[in-house]
Amino acid sequence: MILLLPQNQNNGKMSRKILIINGHPDKESLNHALAASYKEGAIQAGAEVQEIAIAELEFSPNLAFGYRKRTELEPDLLDAWDKIKWADHLVWIHPVWWGGLPAITKGFIDRLFLPGFAFQYRENSIWWDKLLKGKTGHIITTIDQPGYYYRWMYGRPSINQLKKSTLQFCGISPVKVTTLGVVKTSTQELRLRWLQKVNHLGKQLK
């Protein structure tokens, strides 16, 4: 007799743990609407979802002593780190400002992605251990220029910084990228299409 085991509709993905990290400081921004749309899709797909709205955290974004001396982590950062450890997929949503990340988002990374937390330098070596291996990522970013122009004219500095120099540096891989633009000239109809696109990404658990 062949025993047929029950299959869920998402081919084993229903228990995926997704953390949405919102890097826009304005609660009324398109980025916050995108985060909500992604969350809705992911929950519909059966994922467990938690969120970090960086602007709502109480912490100093200044890594005052660099790596020379440890700055104690505020309770909100400790809670954020617990969520990062919990998740197996990190979705970063942020705008591109001056080719980079919003200051609050950069400060969040500076304060939290520390040696001993996200990576560890090896003694007397140029190499390091990647402490966030096993996790995947997705960057969803809004820009005020066409994505192809941002890539070929400027080399996508914000994406290189977050994807290569931060997430992949710490072992998070693969990291997918979705760019949405041009925001400043976008119509309501176009923004609705972006929201639907991100909702579909959530349903796909990507």
Image (cartoon, rainbow, N blue to C red):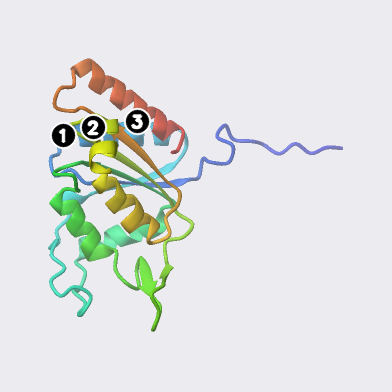
Q: Circle 2 — which element?
A: helix
Q: Closer to the N terminus: mark 3 or mark 1?
A: 1
- Type of the residue with mark 1: Ser
Q: Residues within 10 Å of mark 2 (few under 14, many from 20)?
A: some
Crowd tier of the residue under label 3, counting other residues whose Cα lies within 10 Å: few below 14, some 14–19, many 20 or above: many
Residue 67, placed above or below residue 42: below
Q: Image quadrant of residue 143?
A: top left
Among numbered discs 3 and 2, the one appearing first in the sequence:
2
Asked whether the viewer can see residue 201, the reply is: yes
Outermost residue, right side:
1
Residue situated furthest bottom in the rendering? 124
Q: Position of residue 161 (x, y in %)?
A: 28, 53
Query: Residue 142: x percent and y percent?
Result: 23, 35
- Pick the residue in front: 32 or 161: 161
Residue 53 coordinates in the image, percent (x, y): 22, 47
Residue 33 image label: 2
Quarter of the figure with residue 169: bottom left
- Residue, far top: 189
**Residue in the image at 29% along x and 46% along y:** 159
Vertical comparison of 142 with 53: above or below:
above
Badge 1 element:
loop
**Residue 44 visible in the current orientation:** no
Mark sitting on residue 29: 1
- Which kind of residue does numbered mark 2 sit on? Ala
Tell whether label 1 touches label 2 (CB within 8 Å): yes
Name the residue type under label 3. Val
Q: Which mark is residue 198?
A: 3
Residue 75: quarter of image = bottom left
